[in-house]
Amino acid sequence: MGGELLVRWTARIAVACYIARLLCDTSSKEWTDSQKRARIFWSVGCVVFLLHVIAAFHFIHNWRHAAAFEATAKRTAEMTGWNAGFGLYVNEAFLLLWLTDTFLWWQDLSWPKHRCIYWAVQSIFAFLMIQATAVFGPPFWIPVVLLVIALLTLRRFRLTSTLR
């Protein structure tokens, strides 16, 4: 049971770090300080998500990729009626994206100023966080995640309009 709790809580902490990063991104504080805090949350979230993947493979799937693929397909079928395990590959690509983005941000603090890259990464993250909560999270996560995204969007638009 301890392994399952570790898998569950590392996922939740990674999501919390993602949300904390978004809160830093939408804050009206001085850009450099805000970005340094955001980068810390982003990095911690990345490491915790890596631990989540490791814990899932160790405690749940016994280091067997085929078992992880089957479990993903089964859970996806339970939730959506679509028996597909390719979400595992999406999850692996997501980890690679997060690791790469984190590495690049540590190389250059102004990395998020590349607006096209920033919005592409954030769009992918938001989409995948919603998908993951719909398939693997408890039912109450879906409205919570949608509410957080709506509030962050409203906050961003409000800050943008007051800064003009």
Image (tube, rainbow, N blue to C red):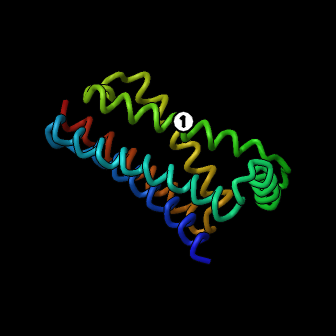
| Number of marks drawn | 1
- Pointer 1 residue: 96
The residue depicted at 82 percent of the width and 58 percent of the height is 74
**Considering depth in this image, is 38 or 46 the residue closer to the camera?**
46
Query: Seen from this angle, which residue lies furthest bottom?
Result: 1
- Residue 129 located left or right of residue 64: left
Residue 156 screen position, x and y as percent: 32, 41
Q: Amino acid at mark 1?
A: Leu
Local SS, label 1? helix
Q: Position of residue 9 (x, y in %)?
A: 50, 66
Quadrant for the C terminus, please.
top left
* Quadrant the N terminus occupies: bottom right
The image quadrant of residue 35 is top left
Q: What residue is at 58 percent from the left and 50 percent from the top?
A: 130
Residue 50 percent location from the top left of the image? 51, 49
Q: In percent of the image, x 30 and y 41: which residue is there?
A: 39
The residue located at (39%, 36%) in the rendering is: 102
- Residue 4, image x and y in percent? 61, 70
- Give the vertical position of 116 relative to 15 (above or below): above
User: Going by the picture, which residue comes out furthest to the left?
Assistant: 30
Check the image and report above or below for 101 versus 68.
above
Query: Mark 1: few, some, or many residues within 10 Å (few <14, many ≥20)?
Result: some
In front here: 11 or 154?
A: 11
| Drawn side of residue 30 relative to residue 156, left or right | left
